[in-house]
Image: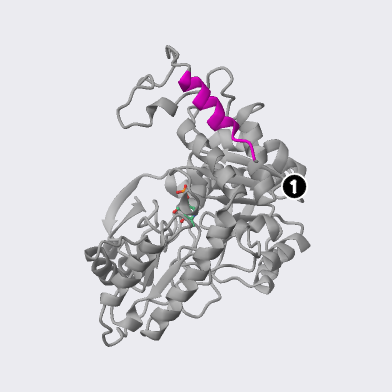
Amino acid sequence: MISTPICDFIDRYAAREPVRMHMPGHKGRALTGCEWADITEIGGADSLYAPGGIIRESEKNAARLFGAGQTLYSTEGSSQCIRAMCYLAMLAFAEKAPGVRPAILAGRNAHKAFLTAAALLDFDVVWLYPENSAYSLCRCDLSPGALSAALERTPNGAAVYVTSPDYLGNCADIKALALAAHEKGVPLLVDNAHGAYQAFLQENRHPMALGADLCCDSAHKTLPVLTGGAYLHIGRGAGPVFYSGAREGMALFGSTSPSYLILRSLDQANRDLAGDYPERLGALAEALEGMKGRLRARGWGFAGDEPLKVTLETKAFGYTGPEAAACLEKEGVVCEYADPDYLVLMPAAESSGEDLRRAEGALAVLQRRPALGMGPPGLCVPERVMPIREAILSPRAVLPAGQAVGRVCGGLPVACPPAVSPVVPGERIGRETAGICRYYGIESITVVK
Ligand SMILES: Cc1ncc(COP(=O)(O)O)c(C=O)c1O
């Protein structure tokens, strides 16, 4: 059986009922009930940013389970890992091309953590715009051919960064994109925040199995892990700088007080993943296929190809996403995400058969209505005026989206979720872009003064 060294240490420690003359201030006494396990980096508890004991052992277990060359735990979500991945790309590029200003080629549906990384690390971004004909803020289909061409045009390309799966459950062809990037000697970084579970599908679809050099997984999004728990995985074939610099990269963006509740949860998850998790996951994927089939027969259509997401195309059924979400909420079903076009349900292996029946039952309450004709606005490519860092650090003002037309974006105009921005800092806000912001519920934009 796989070891759970962090759980074992905390259990033994709490059982001794020691006088806790160390942080945290609650001293292990119950306020919410979990304080007994909430320790700090005391002797024997190892240290997240210089591990050599129980954390290291637990991370090694995780690396084996995910097929990674190395796995590092994050207690601050994929957001921390994304910044660390970009830092590592900078480090590798500085060795390859000293003195050259680096750029990362990134799918335009990047989460805002990537934009904060660009601001903090001051690299340029070459945006890869979606090749799908139907525009949606979250979706950015990329072909290996277009990626090769973009790499050809970008001699200072330090890395390729893609988001897969996206918030709607669209998955990129990671294998083909990795080949295209590697052909040009550039590493592939994958935001796999939504796809940790893919390593445990019958056919392993995790980026580590498909050739990515680095990827992050929000364990907490799809696995039985506390919020904040995430992994930074390094691919077996990744360059040596990624291995030697990873810990420092994580420390650069992390708190010096990592949560042992989250570490314990990541440790415990290893045992679950090594146990019957794959069978439970397979059963869920099958049950969801059945559910989608029955809903299709009632007229529902779905977006995305990720097996654990149920992404309903609500407009064809006569509802906006938020209208459908409100109907489900009345039936006691709370969804993950809704935008004008889609409603996203995110079950997990922990969802019970009864949970799925209730979700399907709540959808059955919705009566089909005439389709809503209005689609999302078309794709718009804003003009770049200054680097992201310069814009973020400029004096700023907040304006209603309509009044921001013609101004340069100075902040992150995102609704969260999905924390994807129609316009990024340093870009001029055109009339169409302001329209896209309003379409996605972004009413005000920070502009450079
Ligand atoms: C695509 C994507 N990437 C990254 C993140 C950040 O993940 P975390 O919340 O674990 O920091 C999110 C969060 O929702 C996300 O949707």
What residue is disc 1 on? Answer: 97
Q: Position of residue 161 (x, y in %)?
A: 60, 57
Looking at the rendered image, the quarter that the N terminus falls into is: top right
Tell me where residue 151 sits by quadrant. bottom right
Q: Nearer the viewer, residue 217 or 111?
A: 217
Q: Position of residue 23 (x, y in %)?
A: 43, 19
Q: Please tell me which residue is depicted at 55% across the width and 25% down the height of the picture.
A: 9
Tell me where residue 317 sits by quadrant. bottom left
Q: Eyeballing the image, is 34 above or below 378?
A: above
Q: Eyeballing the image, is 130 above or below 334?
A: below
Left or right: where 137 falls relative to 159: left
Q: Eyeballing the image, is 282 above or below 291?
A: above
SS for callout 1: loop
Please indicate, yes or no, whether residue 307 appears anywhere in the rendered image: no
Q: Nearer the viewer, residue 125 or 440?
A: 440
Reply yes or no: does residue 90 show up in magenta: no
Residue range in magenta is 2-15
Q: Residue furthest left?
A: 330
Amino acid type, callout 1: Ala
Q: Please tell me which residue is depicted at 45% across the width and 13% down the height of the picture.
A: 18
Main SS of residues in magenta: helix
Q: Residue furthest bottom?
A: 370
Left or right: where 39 falls relative to 299: right
Q: Position of residue 429 (x, y in %)?
A: 38, 63
Q: Please tell me which residue is depicted at 38% across the width and 22% down the height of the picture.
A: 28
| Number of residues whose C-alpha sits closer than 10 Å to that of mark 1, classed few (under 14), some (14–19) or many (20 or more) | few
Q: Nearer the viewer, residue 2 or 400?
A: 2
- Total labels drawn: 1
